[in-house]
Amino acid sequence: MGKTTTRTTRTTSEVAAAEEYDHRESDDEEDEDEEDLDGESDDEDVITVNFDFCDAQEEDFHGLKALLTGYCDGAEYACSDLCDLLIRQNAVGTVMKTEDDSENVLGMTSVVSLAYYKGEKCVKDIKKYLLGKVPAKEKKAFEKILNDDATGLLINERIINVPQDAGQPLIEGVFDEIGWAAKDEKTAELRKSYEFKNYILVSTLSARRDNQKNSESSRDWRRRSCSNTLNRR
């Protein structure tokens, strides 16, 4: 396709009017610059941060552990084992850092096959935790999904002051990686382990507990919930 060039021709009067406008606009910009220098501008400072998205490495162990220690909402689980697993499973999963700081992990996303890694203590602990959060009438149905060969635990965590938009590439990338792993992993067993049909996402939500007799009735209570497969308040 050829390149299209648009040329604009203006009359003398139009040029004069444009020059006068440009002069006024320049004066306005100078006034704004002076206000900024005097500290009189109400505009907030904008900080630009460049994020790096990369595979988890051994050096990320402590950063991952700091991020995932509270994954089960304060309940004890084999967090160190989970961090080791996420680093070992390098075909799927991404960590987010800043360009200027390669040590601190600001966010991460990965998917763990609950069937393939069912022997790992961290997986056993997490499954036990999740089952303990499910209402009795739905426990049987949820347990069936939990033990399905095609169920993946979608882990998506970031520190609280990282904007949601900044973490979007993590989610977008992990599903691309799952597609590649299902085709390109070394063994048939590994490839099959990434053929997910169900995903379980553990997320934090706020719920209001109403109790007129309690002075704390207006307080927001935070708890963990299973969503996608199950979402309960």
Image (cartoon, grey):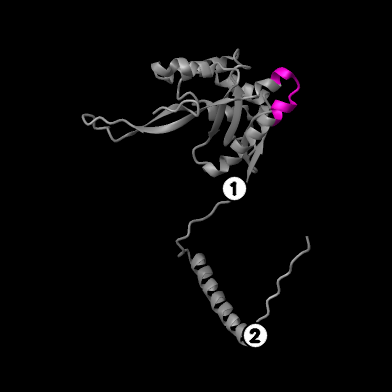
Q: Can the viewer see residue 56?
A: no
Q: CA distance from mark 1 to mark 2?
A: 46 Å
Mark 1 or mark 2: whose residue is earlier in sequence: 2
Q: Amino acid at mark 2?
A: Thr
Residue 185 colored in magenta in the image: yes
Q: Which residues are magenta?
A: 180-190
- Residue 14 x, y percent position in the rendering: 61, 83
**Disc 1 and disc 2 in contact, CB within 8 angstroms:** no
Q: Quadrant of residue 107?
A: top right
The residue nearer to you, when weighing 69 against 100, is 69
Residue 148 colored in magenta in the image: no
Report the residue at 71% width, 31% height from top.
180
Report the residue at 54% width, 32% height from top.
157
- Classify mark 1: helix, strand or loop: loop
- Residue 129 x, y percent position in the rendering: 47, 18
The residue indicated by pointer 2 is 11
Looking at this view, name the residue that lies furthest to the front.
1
Q: Which quarter of the image is occupied by the C terminus?
A: top left
Task: Answer few, some or many: residues within 10 Å of disc 1's Cα (few below 14, many 20 plus, some between 14 and 19).
Answer: few
The residue nearer to you, when weighing 71 against 196, is 196
The reply, left or right, for residue 100 in relation to residue 231 is right
Report the residue at 57% width, 14% height from top.
121
- On residue 49, the disc is 1
From the viewer's perspective, is residue 13 above or below residue 205? below
Q: Nearer the viewer, mark 1 or mark 2?
A: 2
- Classify mark 2: helix, strand or loop: loop
- Residue 28 x, y percent position in the rendering: 52, 74
Looking at this view, name the residue that lies furthest to the bottom.
12
Report the residue at 29% width, 35% height from top.
218
Looking at this view, name the residue that lies furthest to the right.
2
